[in-house]
Image (tube, grey):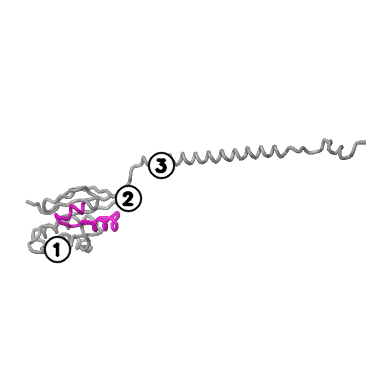
Amino acid sequence: MIPLWLLLACSPDSEPTQSTAVDSTTDWEDDADADTDTDTDTDTDADTDADTDADTADEPYIPHDPIRIYAVRHCEKDGGDDPGLTEEGAERAEALAVLMEEIALDGIYATSYLRTQETVQPTADDQGLTVVTDIDPEDDLAEHIRATHPGQTVLHAGHSFSLGDFGEAVGLADGALSVSGYGQLWIIDVVGDGTAVVEESTFGLVDD
């Protein structure tokens, strides 16, 4: 007689005992697929970033918030320790105000000397602005204008001994503002990357 436990062990309905090894192989394949997906995504993202950087590098630089500065030397001066303008100088200052009528100014600057203040005062009166006179024009004024007037337009009156340094302070090359007489007008555009370009013109009376 065959024992009952032996009959049960040999029965066709009994379940196999090797499923664990098959499942392990399946899990390994799933993990391998997951790693492949991760690597592919990473490589794709890196390629995309590289393409984006290349595209950005090819784009031209666009200045942000450029500043326009109208710079002049004071008009003809009188005599004395701190002279004002002569009659001819006062006429030239009025001519400057007329020239500025079509230009909306956001600030007007002059040095602590009377002759520069009288040069821009008619313009300030016309535009309802106060002339700022307490900032060093050779260094601190350039920094002040950059910080205070992004995207705006200002007027500054200086001297033959100060305008060259002021020009360098706003980003122009040495000697870009070369004073040779009265009635010179420099139009300086300071762009967002700190560089500047200048165009020279004249105003008022012709200097003989």
**Residue where numbered disc 1 is placed:** 114
In front: label 3 or label 2? 3
Classify residue 154 as left or right of residue 181. Answer: right
Q: Name the residue under label 3.
A: 53
* CA distance separating discs 3 and 2: 20 Å
Q: Which of marks 3 and 2 is nearer the N terminus?
A: 3
**Tag 2: amino acid:** His
Disc 2 is placed on an element classified as loop
Magenta stretch, residue numbers = 138-167
Say what amino acid the circle numbered 3 marks: Asp
**Viewed as shown, does residue 154 lie left or right of 32?**
left
| Position of residue 41 measured from the top left corner of the image (x, y, whole percent) | 52, 40
Q: Quadrant of residue 104?
A: bottom left
| SS for callout 3 | helix
Q: Mark 2 points at which residue?
A: 64
Q: Residue at x 30, y 55 (%)?
A: 150
Q: Position of residue 191 (x, y in %)?
A: 28, 49
198, 123: nearer the viewer: 198
